[in-house]
Amino acid sequence: MHIITRSFFPCRPNPPTNWAAGDPCGDPWYGVTCSGTSVVAISLSGAYCHGVIPSEIGMLSSLTALTLNYEGLSGTLPTQLGALSRLTLLSLCCVNAISGIIPTQLGALSRLTQLNLGHNALMGTIPIELGALSLLTYLWLGDNLLSGTLPPQLFLLSRLCYLQLERSSFSGTLPCELGALAHLNNLYLSGNSFSGSLPTQLTQLSLQTFAIVRGVARRWATGA
């Protein structure tokens, strides 16, 4: 754990000083949850720990939740995140500046139910490998620099309830496969460059929130 903590310093305004030494499970560390001698969760939201996510994160084989929101993190997403086979929650959102691409290795996180990479500086396209995350219910990739069309594999996520892709550079048409996401009730797509008609299959969904772009939604709805 110590090589990982060094990557996250300095933290402000309140550094978790008990990270400096000792055993994170024997001497409980701020933001770290253990089961026995194994670290199972790290949650540092709001501690504002500058730094990068080190490749050594993949050594925490028992980790089920990694939450580093509002931290001022930079660097890229290490491919070793894909080795965290027990991970159910990965949230790296907001007031971070993580850049580079979304690693294809994230598609190996077969237990993942929530993935939040929003409000960063990620580039490239959505990897098709994310379509293998069959337990995913929450996906936020918006507020990045992502581009390209939406991969059809994204619509294999049959348990998805929440999909946020706003304020990026996605383009192309919205596929009719969106209507196959039977559990989807929150859909955010505004701030992109989608074109074409709104898929009629969306009327089959019980959407509580549906945000495209005011005016564009009306044009799509009429098929114009």
Image (tube, grey):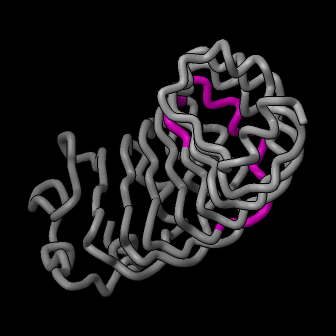
* Relative to 9, 202 lies left or right: right
139 is higher (above) or lower (below) than 66: above
Q: How far from the left and from the top, in percent, is residue 112?
A: 50, 35
Q: Which residues are magenta?
A: 122-139
| Residue 163, position as x, y percentages in the image | 58, 38
Left/right placement of residue 34 relative to residue 165 reads: left
Image quarter of the N terminus:
bottom left
On the image, the x and y values in percent for residue 146 come to: 73, 60
Q: From the viewer's perspective, tell me whether residue 62 is left or right of residue 205.
A: left
Q: Nearer the viewer, residue 8 or 218?
A: 218
- For the C terminus, the quadrant is top right
Q: Is residue 94 above or below residue 49?
A: above
Let me know if residue 134 is in the magenta part. Answer: yes
Res. 112 in view:
no
Q: Residue furthest left?
A: 27
Q: Determine if the magenta segment contains residue 224.
A: no
Q: Quadrant of residue 191?
A: bottom right
Can residue 120 be seen here? yes
